[in-house]
């Protein structure tokens, strides 16, 4: 075992090790497996995904109801808040974070995902709802200030505060991050902030492409999509579960690779199910299927097959990497990787049953 995987030493680390022994739940008797699942109208090849480990509509209803109340408190009007409830970000949290049934823990994920999606729709993607490529970068700069507090700066602070309070997306992201900070450590909060900010670089690239009308080749889109993927949602897996994967393991290259494979695979599911919605915008939204079809001059059906095959390979690569990482003696890492696998299974289930993608 190399030193990195052996873990840190020094102040505070023995306490962390004791906490980690407590954090390990009993291992499942049978490991949940992977299955081939039909999707859409059933005409394309199946997707190879982990099984959805928990479908609990009663728990999802509780989390969604609390999410709607929170959205109203952030300034979303009644219709918008109900729409967030109907979109089922609470249900997404229940499907993807299967190692807790505490609604307040699940709300960590429900709130952040709802707020990320609100920023994505209202700032980046949906022209009809006010998203414009030119306004996107400065709006995202303020999101960073909402999530990662700016140090007091005399006379400049009041104007910033006013701006942060005057926009419901900013209020939501600030509130969701504060909720996370109350229930997890600073390592996780900064992990979440910085993966969100990396995601924004990708959003800015899409905005430039949509503004100029010069859309990227599929390879460039895919590289950009790595940081704009459900990797961002997966940063919450341990926090929602009530434990913490130490940073030296979270960022270990083989772990990071497994995570980016899982995040990209899950967002390929999103692309596959969003093709029509993305193509319909007056400035079409970048999407792997559309980029492949444009590159190759092939039909959408052929580009779909190519995307399914890419997705399935990513999942198989994750599965293999996960197996290899079983050799690392860390209960938190094993729990986290089981959480990543469960996230993929639940993410597929959510997309396949959500009215947004029907
Ligand atoms: C939940 C989360 C991390 C959101 C950030 C952006 C993201 C990966 C999505 C919202 C999914 O991609 P896309 O913008 O294509 O999603 P929709 O098709 O609009 O649902």
Image (tube, helix red, strand yellow):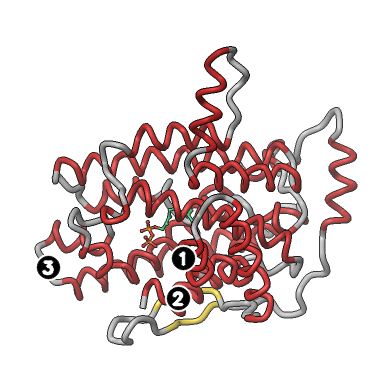
Task: Please give the label number shown on residue 298.
Answer: 3
Instruction: Please state which of the two labelled residues, at mark 1 or mark 2, is closer to the viewer.
Output: 1
Q: Where does the image place residue 98, in percent across and percent down from the top left?
A: 68, 69
First in sequence: mark 3 vs mark 1: 1
In front: label 2 or label 3: 2
SS label for mark 2? loop
Identify the image quadrant of the N terminus. Answer: top right
Q: Tell me which label, 1 or 2, sits earlier in the chain.
A: 1
Which one is in front in this view, the residue at disc 3 or the one at disc 1?
1
Q: Residues within 10 Å of mark 2 (few under 14, many from 20)?
A: some
Q: Secondary structure at mark 1?
A: helix
Q: Nearer the viewer, residue 50 or 194?
A: 194
Answer with the quadrant where ligand 1 appears in the image.
Answer: bottom left
Q: Sequence order check: which comes first, mark 2 or mark 3?
A: 3
Q: Nearer the viewer, residue 206 or 252?
A: 206
> Residue sitting at 82 percent across and 65 percent down?
25
Mark 1 highlights which residue? 79
Quickly name the residue at label 2.
Answer: 354
Q: Is residue 316 visible?
A: no
Pick out the residue farthest to the top. Answer: 154
Q: Point out residue 102 in the picture as x, y percentages from the top left corner.
A: 76, 66
Q: Residue at x 45, y 54 (%)?
A: 118
Q: Going by the picture, which residue comes out furthest to the left? A: 297
Residue 83 at what x, y percent from top left?
47, 67
Query: CB of mark 2 within 8 Å of CB of mark 3?
Result: no
Q: Nearer the viewer, residue 60 or 196?
A: 60
């Amino acid at each position: 075992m190399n030193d990195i995987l052996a873990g840190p030493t020094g102040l505070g680390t023995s306490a962390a090790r004791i906490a980690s022994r407590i954090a390990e739940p009993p291992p499942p008797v049978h490991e949940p497996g992977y299955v081939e699942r039909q999707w859409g109208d059933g005409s394309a090849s199946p997707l190879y995904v982990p099984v959805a480990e928990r479908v609990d509509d009663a728990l999802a209803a509780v989390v969604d109801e609390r999410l709607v109340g929170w959205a109203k408190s952030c300034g979303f009007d009644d219709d918008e808040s109900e729409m967030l409830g109907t979109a089922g970000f609470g249900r997404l949290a229940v499907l993807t974070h299967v190692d807790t049934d505490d609604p307040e823990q699940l709300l960590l994920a429900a709130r952040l995902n709802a707020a990320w999606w609100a920023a994505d729709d209202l700032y980046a993607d949906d022209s009809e709802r006010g998203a414009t490529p030119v306004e996107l970068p400065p709006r995202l700069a303020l999101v960073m200030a909402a999530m990662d507090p700016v140090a007091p700066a005399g006379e400049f602070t009041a104007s910033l505060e006013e701006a942060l309070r005057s926009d419901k997306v900013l209020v939501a992201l600030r509130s969701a991050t504060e909720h996370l900070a109350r229930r997890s450590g600073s390592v996780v909060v900064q992990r979440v902030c910085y993966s969100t900010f990396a995601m924004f670089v990708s959003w800015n690239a899409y905005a430039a492409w949509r503004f100029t009308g010069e859309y990227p080749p599929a390879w460039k889109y895919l590289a950009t999509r790595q940081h704009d993927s459900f990797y961002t949602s997966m940063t919450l897996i341990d926090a929602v579960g009530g434990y913490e994967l130490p940073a030296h393991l979270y960022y270990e290259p083989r772990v990071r690779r497994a995570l980016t494979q899982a995040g990209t695979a899950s967002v390929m599911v999103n692309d596959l199910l969003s093709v029509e919605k993305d193509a319909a915008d007056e400035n079409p939204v970048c999407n792997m299927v559309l980029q492949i079809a444009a590159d190759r001059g092939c039909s959408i059906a052929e580009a779909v097959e190519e995307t399914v095959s890419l997705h399935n390979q990513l999942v198989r690569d994750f599965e293999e990497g996960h197996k290899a990482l079983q050799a690392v003696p860390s209960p938190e890492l094993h729990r986290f990787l089981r959480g990543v696998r469960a996230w993929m299974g639940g993410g597929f289930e959510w997309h396949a049953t959500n009215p947004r993608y029907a």
